Image (cartoon, helix red, strand yellow):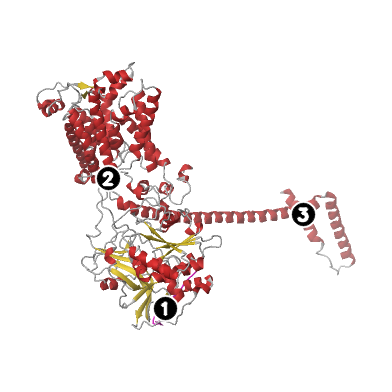
Amino acid sequence: MALLKITSPHMSSAGKTGDVMLTVVLATLPGLALLTWFFGWGNLINIAWASLVAVSCEALVISIRQRSVMFYLTDYSALLTGVLIGLSLPSLAPWWLTLIATSFAIIFAKHLYGGMGQNPFNPAMVGYALVLIAFPVEMTSWLAPKSLPGNDQIPSFLQTLTAIFPFVGGEAVDAFTMATPLDTFKHKGEQLAAQLWASEPVLSPSSWLAWQSISAGYLLGGAYLLYKKVFTWHTPVALLVAMTIISGIFWLIDPDSYGSPLLHLLGGATMLGAFFIATDPVSSATSVKGRLYYGAAIGILVYIIRTWGNYPDAIAFAVLLMNFAAPFIDYYTQPRTYGHQISHQKTRSGQ
Amino acid sequence: MNRKLWDFHGGIHPPENKAQSTREPIVRPPLPSRLVLPLQQHIGQSSQCLVKAGQKVLKGQLIAAPDGYVSLAMHAPTSGTVIDITSAPVPHPSGLTDRCIIIEPDGLDKWVPHSGISDYTRAEPERLLQIIRESGIAGLGGAGFPTSVKLNPSEEVTIRTLIINAVECEPYITADDMLMREHASEVIQGIMIIAHILKPESIQIGIEDNKSEAIESLKNAIATHDREQSIELVVIPTKYPSGGEKQLIQVLTGCEVPNGGIPADIGIVCQNVGTAAAVYRAIIKGEPLIYRVTTFTGEALGQPRNLEVLIGTPVNELLEFCDLNDSELNRLIMGGPMMGFSLLSDSVPVIKTTNCILASTEAEIPLPPPEQACIRCGMCETVCPASLLPQQLYWHAKSKDYDKAINHNLLDCIECGACTYVCPSNIPLVQYYRHAKGEIRMLEHEHTRSDHSRQRFEMRIKRLEQEAAAREEKKKARQQAAAKASAARNKASNNQGAKAAVIQAALERTRAKKTRLATDSKSSVNRAEPEPETKTVTGSDNRENT
């Protein structure tokens, strides 16, 4: 009789990293559905294309690194990166834009740092930031939402496909593009906020409905992930609360010049960022207390960059900046260990 | 019972798997063909063997004595013959062999004369402690620390609370549960004896709410035996590892055992229910610890149940008794599935700390899937009962960055396995920590050793230097003395007048001699006398010239 010699613990709940990633992909569905409803097929096609690129790049690098391709592909982390990039890019982003963002994310931001679990920066956001800096025009033209009165030009599937992949050879589109609410608000110049809300079509109730519905969709997905205990509440709640507080303060001081908390929470990628980007465990702070600081700092940074910086939406830069700070935050937010008086007394004394 | 309870950080709820071994009452298996009694079954010094091969022993006879304060007495579990004292496989994670007394039972099961104390309340606590020590009782919960030592805290501390650990939080194990169901009165009386020794202000039994039958029996026993109702039965929520000593203290009192300290430092002593029952038998019946209740469970057994096992019974005979399906057996675990260790051989004996033997099949406890990369999801952190950062410890342990691991309080890890249990990447975290702890211990050992050698070396250098200095000193002193002497002589010889006088005197003496020779040619007295003097003078002159 050959007895198995294994040290304790013998039991495990036999989870899989892949299950975690698939749950996150699943949670993006409400947001994605609403995005598709209001803006057409574009993001769905982007996601499919980005996922294909992501998984192919992952397979390529892993085979170059001489590891088991299927073992790594089934952790579905590359798929998730592709989905997140596809969600973030404008719906009619050309195919090469998605290709550049995604391949850069997987090859450079992920695998050159050592692959799964080793990357200090959120790969999807590295890819996104790259194309945002390099191709500002393509990155800032969004379609007008379907809910906008008079917008009967939401392109068909084939038209969208042709717009993204011009070589498909379908009928050319003449879609009605416009800036995002945050972009519009950023470039309002001397106009008062109230005038802007009254005059700009993108801020009209019917258009605003689209934007806030999509945000609500991501919020719903985030709530599902919290319920499934994929992450703890600390990062997203800290992020949203910090952003509400800082935008609320400025808005109360001068509501004519500063956007309301609602605009900041629902008008852009805040919800997507709070629940799907900032919660990326690999690149974020890992201690529970640290995640509070990490989330709050992202919320404040997003507001600062949106209000005084050059970019109307700033999730990517805020997340990447805090990725830098994550190890530092972890170092100083160790929990108090059982039976210890002060937390990390030894580390504090600089050992 | 409305009582404030505290919670400890983290914890998990693994499948309990306790029902299968509680269907039958505790059974006493037949006498084994032989008993293997390791001299080390406890924390502390090995016991000192008192018997020789070939010697006849009676049941309950002392066969090994404690060797030092933190050590344990051992008794023959049945009557028979000591057939050997030799190295045999012992139940230890290392799988090593150790010295064991091997007894062949004679089947008579004949007791050595023994008697208990009928009224322990009149006995001096010191006397009771002595009996507990002589009865060889160690903590039956798992660690096996000599009970008499634990019940005799230092003079500086006052024990305010006695906590009885009836939690039994690990899956599969039901030995304490069954003991309480069937022998609650022994347990309660044992607790009262312990309380008589310690005189605490409060006595609390902590038990998980999944043991309703045991709770009921304990309640009845308390009502019967404890007239003042001084024992408080506290039902706590089921959560692993609330049966850890530190965690139970936190749940019941809200206090934490200080880092590096013991519960007695905060006025608490913890005892396991099994230990309490053993104390009862030792004091009231005069029976030393020679048997215990052990759970035999797992899907490889046809009849999983609790057995009243003689200490030293080989595991294979008991597995046989529980209808082992040999072909299905995959892992043999001593202890629970969370903290127990796998046995390399089924010939090892049940010892005083063996609360469970888990004979599992491959389907029941499969091999863990391959380890994936850590995604720092932090699930391990949320379940860690010691409030550590397992994800950081993992990085530091893996990269052999032991200083950082120590700074993250690796050494506070209790190896409960909760982190490994929840890890979605199937990383064997506890194994990494255990390895790192071992490495750290080894490094510390090497460090101490190199410190010693350095000290020895430095002492030697110092000694050699001192010797050299002493020699130098002596040499100097000698030189000085010599210099002084020669200086004195030089002084004498340098004095010109004296020199002249000496020469004069010598000449005069010669002259006188000549005259004497002339006057008395036969006399030669004192002839040699002047010569040395002249010589000395010349000698010192020579020295001066060179």
- Which residue position holds label 2? A228
In the rendered image, residue B188, in percent from the top left (x then y), is placed at 42, 68
N-terminal-most mark, 1 or 3: 1
- Which residue position holds label 1? B60
Q: Is residue A261 above or below residue B523?
A: above
B272 in magenta: no
Task: Measure the alpha-carbon separation of dots 3 and 2.
Answer: 115 Å
- Which residue occupies the foreground of this view, B354 or A240? A240
Pointers 1 and 3 in contact (C-beta within 8 Å) = no
Chain letter for mark 3? B
**Residue at the (26%, 72%) spot, across then down:** B320
**Residue A247 numbered mark, or none:** none
Mark 3 or mark 2, whichever is nearer to me: 2
Query: What range of the chain is rendered magenta?
Result: B53-70
In the rendered image, residue B466, in percent from the top left (x then y), is placed at 61, 55
Q: Secondary structure at mark 3?
A: helix
Dominant SS type (magenta): loop
Task: Measure the alpha-carbon separation of dots 1 and 2.
Answer: 57 Å
Q: Is residue B48 above or below residue B372?
A: below
Q: Amino acid at mark 3?
A: Thr
Q: Secondary structure at mark 2?
A: loop
Residue B70 visible to an observer of this rendering: no
Mark 1 or mark 3, whichever is nearer to me: 1
- Which residue occupies the foreground of this view, B248 or B440? B248
